[in-house]
Image (cartoon, helix red, strand yellow):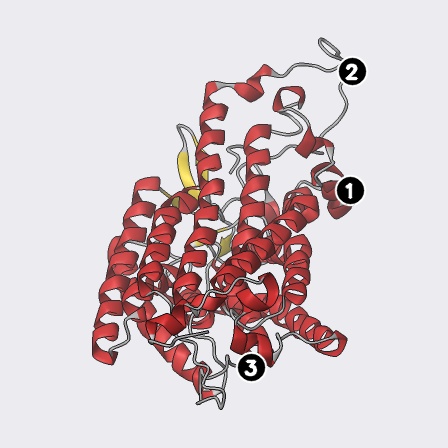
Amino acid sequence: MATHSHGGPAWRKRTNITKGGFAMFTDQVSLEYVLLSFIYTVGAVSVLLVVVGLGFIDMGLVRARNVLVTWVQKLSAAVIAGFGTLLFGYAIWQWQFYEALGIPDPLISALKDWWIGGPASSTASVLLDPKLVPEADVQQVFLVFFVTFSMATAALIHSSVIERIKGAPLYWMSFVIGLVLSPLVGYLCWGPLSPLTNSGVHDFEGVFPLYIFSGTWALVLAWRLGPRRGALAQDPSGVKPTPSNYGLVAVGVLFIFFAIPFIAIGSTWILPDKGVYGISFTQSGIGLILVNIFSAVLTGGVAGAVIGWMRREVSWVFLGPIAGVVMGGTLFDIGTPLESMLFGALGPFVALGTAKLVQSMGIEEPKVVPLALGPGIAGAILVGFLKWGTATGGFPGLEGEYALGHAQITPLWQLIGVVATMLVSGIPAFIMCLIFEKAGGLRVSPEAEITGLDDSYWGVENFGDDRAKGVVRS
């Protein structure tokens, strides 16, 4: 993210014309700013690897006859959510800076400047006054970061309802999420000047806007859709959601592993010659963040392997490390490797407990809710206890209620952040489910579930799951 304080309205037409009708601000393209732009570009683009990883995981877990539709729905949902954020979503996040700087009508001003047709997002950096838009390239790259973040959010939600959701409801939900809801959670509790951060809520790697938000939406959506045929009880048709290839799950997990460190670097403020800070301006360091991430990933992997072997459920071997890294997502910028190891080791056990609880409620959702919602909530609240009193929030150069480090992390505010995120996600999810249930249904037809979605929607007869069982089809 940018390295200095924002300084006023994002754009203003210049009067000292020197070239092409505009002033040229060559400081905007200094070597330092170009390097920072590249660093954050890598972080932004790496989020797409999470979408790829989720695609491979789901590809391995669905029946072979549903592989094509799984990819089509995931890619479409991700693109639509990203498009929504591209239009206005980033401006909602910028709202917090406009409020802190006392700009009149901060939300309207942010929308005018940072919607995709606004001058701040559609003008070359060399033409933007650094007093008005400091490090313009970096801020424009961060717009892309938010776009890819929304894409990952929609892809993660889709993973909770594979093989049974209709395309249209999923796509409309993705658009609303990308346009308003995911950026709104970012505005509330992910950023140095966000309202909840300034009271003591702490996040780092997007636990609130990505994991808790997606997990809540997934829980509501999976509840309304019901389980896949044969998932929780024997189905009269004989349909059973048999995974097509567990090896692809491992491939997907490795894609996510590769992406997470770069995404973490994209969640920092880098101030050359001054320091590296987490997104809420907590003191940190790139090396420490990476060590913490790998500490959580590896101990999560060990714990997941133990659970997998004890329960004879191979999925935990692959998904345990993800539970570990989600559990530590609010800790990596302010924690130590030993603390991250503890969080990582606890992650798979929290995920297992969440999975059992969800199943006992008759809800079939073995991935997103157990891996994202359970560890996300537990890790966020546990950080409130472990780092109670740690300074957070604010911005360099500001005073009063926005002074750097004026807020303190507490368990209560972490809980408030969790509840706020779940309400912003859960209520719209429930309302949209009801609307689509009345308007034509959320779920594909029983015939399509039996035949396979690839054949029903695209005319592709992929019966690899039958061949694996020795079934001969005419």
Q: Earlier in the sequence, mark 1 or mark 2?
A: 2
Q: Is residue 365 above or below residue 237?
A: above
Residue behind mark 2: 15
Alpha carbons under labels 3 and 2: distance apart:
62 Å
Q: Which residue is more in the foreground, 39 or 283?
A: 39
Q: Earlier in the sequence, mark 3 or mark 2?
A: 2
Q: How many marks?
A: 3
On residue 34, the disc is none
Q: Residue 23 at x, y = what percent?
A: 70, 14
Q: Earlier in the sequence, mark 3 or mark 1?
A: 1
In the picture as drawn, the residue positioned furthest to the front comes out as: 474
Mark 1 vs mark 2, foreground winner is 2
**Quarter of image, res 4:** top right
Residue at 28% in and 75% down: 313
Residue at 31% in and 66% down: 320
On residue 104, the disc is 1
Q: Which residue is more in the foreground, 81 or 275?
A: 81
Amino acid type assigned to the residue bearing label 2 in the image: Thr
Q: Which residue is more in the foreground, 366 or 373?
A: 366
Q: Residue 73 at x, y = what percent?
A: 57, 60
**Side (left or right) of 428 relative to 262:** right
Mark 3 vs mark 1, foreground winner is 3
Amino acid type assigned to the residue bearing label 3 in the image: Gly
* Secondary structure of residue under mark 3: loop
Residue behind mark 3: 226
Amino acid type assigned to the residue bearing label 1 in the image: Pro
